[in-house]
Amino acid sequence: MKRRQFLENTIPAAILPSLIDGTSVKVLAHNPIMAAMLNTYVESDRALVIVQLSGGNDGLNMVIPLDQYSNYFNARSNIAIPQNRVLPLTGNTTTGLHPSMTGLQSMYNEGKVRLVQAVGYPNPNFSHFRATDIWMSASDSNVEVTSGWSGRYLSDQYPNYPVGYPNTPMPDPLGIQIGSSTSLTFQGPSVNMGISITSATNFYNLINGIQDPAPATPAGDALKYVRLVAQQSNQYSARIVAAANAVPTQGTYPTNNSLADQLKIVARLIKGGLKTRVYMVSFGSFDTHSIQTNTADTTTGTHATLLQRVSAAIKAFQDDIKNLGVEDRVLGMTFSEFGRRIKSNASVGTDHGAAAPLFVFGKKVNPGITGVNPTIPVTATVNDNVVMQYDFRSVYSSILQDWFCVDNTTLQTIMLQNFQKLPVCANGTCLGPTAVTTRDAGVSLVSNYPNPFTETTTIKFTTAGGHTLIQVMDSLGRVIRTPVDRDYVAGTYNVTFDSYGLPTGVYYVRFQNGITQQVKPMLKAR
């Protein structure tokens, strides 16, 4: 059978992962049972823009703990940012940004950034591939989930997709990723809920009607046919072209910056009228095991260049959507699959670590900082990690609930569990939280005595009532005990922690009650 005849007879257009001048569109089968169960659509013109910092970003050189600067410097003297070069944040004297991040500093000072400290998950995985899957699927680290958190949300909102889509209420792609393929983030329970625009070049080829040339070979002939079938079957390309053509001019974006190129496309499509809920862009690599900084000037080098491009791209995007009049519709967030170790290595770099800060940005954020600077040991070892303060799934849950107005019952179905609510969106966005995590600043809600201890210690905690969680973690960020995980009446309680079988060293007790959390170190001695 000839190649063309094989393609004609065996590729049904409706399920073809189509290529429109390099634009990848995944359209797969549907699950009618799931579609019947999920029917909780919430009308919204809001968009979420997810910025992936791939490779594992070093959060301690991005967000510098000024209140522990001497410990920070001692732990990484060969890459530490000089204290007098750290960018200050309005209203905060304990935390600053890398000197290359003037764009995000400006946005923070304008009230358009929420910084969430020490974001991670229990029992972190330090493999790039597995850690990325965990962040995209929102699974526990020891459970493999084949759907993504955004895909489950979109599946809930648009049941029976792709059958019957596009339609009058939703004529546009549900999710768009700028990249070579649609990631696990967009994978629904049965089908992928997003499409991919493979690159900025292919986007402009699409809207200008330019097709990449195919080689003059039998394979090229087959490629031309596949493209033809794909273009005929794809009903979203016309919507993307129309949206792009509706915005002939945009603001200025930095050059030689692939993240800026991607975000410029996102801004254009949002302004052009697409009802797409979720956009995803990516940039990296942040895998800075060696030569993270220049030895002569630690404020320059590979990591500084990466952070500068991220900061400048996000600032240009925010300015653009403001000038385009769609700033109220857009919320953004950054994430990286993990952070880096507290102590730098001998190669002028940092190794895979646990928790790290992330940014939520936009006009509708609740500005400020959630959490406190991570604890930096006086003498850090190669095993010391930034201990998790907030589960990354709490950030997702809070955005779904307060930005996309997902009800609590549906939220737990999407997120697979019930997670702590964080005030990342402005109050009233969807009747969001009225309290902030700093309401108990300076008040110790959890402590242990004796400290140091040898075998047992009493953990004392004060809860405002409701669900209360206490976890004990080691220096690698692994949860080794969960002494408390239930509802309480408001009050002060004690629980005994037995460390039998655990080696001596520093451990951390993490207290969580509603939107409030605290992390305290405790020392097991001989």
Image: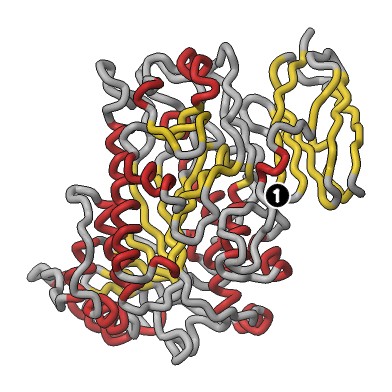
At x 65%, y 84%, the residue is: 36
- The answer to whether 85 is drawn above or below residue 173 in the figure is above
Q: How is the image coloured?
A: secondary structure
Q: Where in the figure is residue 406, as x and y percent of width and height?
A: 63, 70
Position of residue 120 in the picture relative to residue 277 (left or right): right
Q: Is residue 305 visible?
A: yes
What residue is at 43 percent from the left and 46 percent from the top? Answer: 108
Find disc 1 in the rendering and name its residue.
515
SS for tag 1? loop
Residue 146 makes an appearance in the image: no
Q: Residue at x 57, y 77 (%)?
A: 157
Which residue is located at x 62 percent, y 59 percent?
397
Horizontal arrangement in the rendering, residue 471 relative to residue 196 (left or right): right
- Is 113 in front, or is 143? 113
Farthest top residue?
526
Q: Amino acid at mark 1?
A: Ile
Q: Of 254 and 428, which appears nearest the observer?
A: 428
Residue 167 picture quarter? bottom left
State the image coordinates of residue 299 (x, y, percent, origin top left). Answer: 31, 26
